[in-house]
Image (cartoon, grey):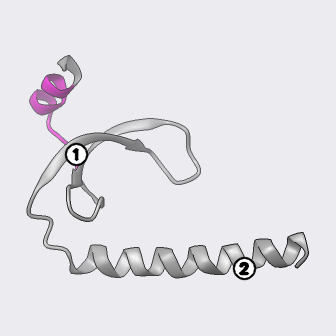
Amino acid sequence: MGKSQKVATLLRERQKIEKEIEILQKSCQHLTKSIKYVRERLDSTTMVVRYVCDDCCLIVGIPNNDKLQNFLKQ
């Protein structure tokens, strides 16, 4: 298997995995959440603070100023 075939195979697998994650996240009720650092965008190295579901890892909100300050003090 050549490099281009290997890359194509890996990209197909990644697409399948991303689709499965999307389905799981859509079906999650996001009952518990935590404040965490996450990448601003998939192609970004900039980190931002967001509420993230503890079960499915989906970004579910932005903390208010008080919550953000408490998080940053830790």
Disc 1 or disc 2, which is closer to the eye? 2
Tell me the amino acid under the disc marked 1.
Answer: Ile
Task: State left or right for residue 29 relative to residue 4.
Answer: left
| Quarter-of-image position of residue 71 | top left
Residue that protrudes farthest toward the front in the picture: 1
Give the residue at mark 1: 62
Q: Do the numbered discs 1 and 2 sit on residues whose CB atoms are within 8 Å?
A: no
Queried whether the magenta region covers residue 68, the answer comes back as yes
Quick one: label 1 or label 2, which is nearer the N terminus?
Answer: 2
Alpha carbon distance from label 1 to label 2: 36 Å
Extent of the magenta region: 61-71
Task: State left or right for residue 58 relative to residue 73.
Answer: right
Q: Residue at x 13, y 24 (%)?
A: 70
Queried whether the magenta region covers residue 37, the answer comes back as no
Horizontal and vertical percent position of residue 33: 15, 52
Q: Residues within 10 Å of mark 1 (few under 14, many from 20)?
A: some
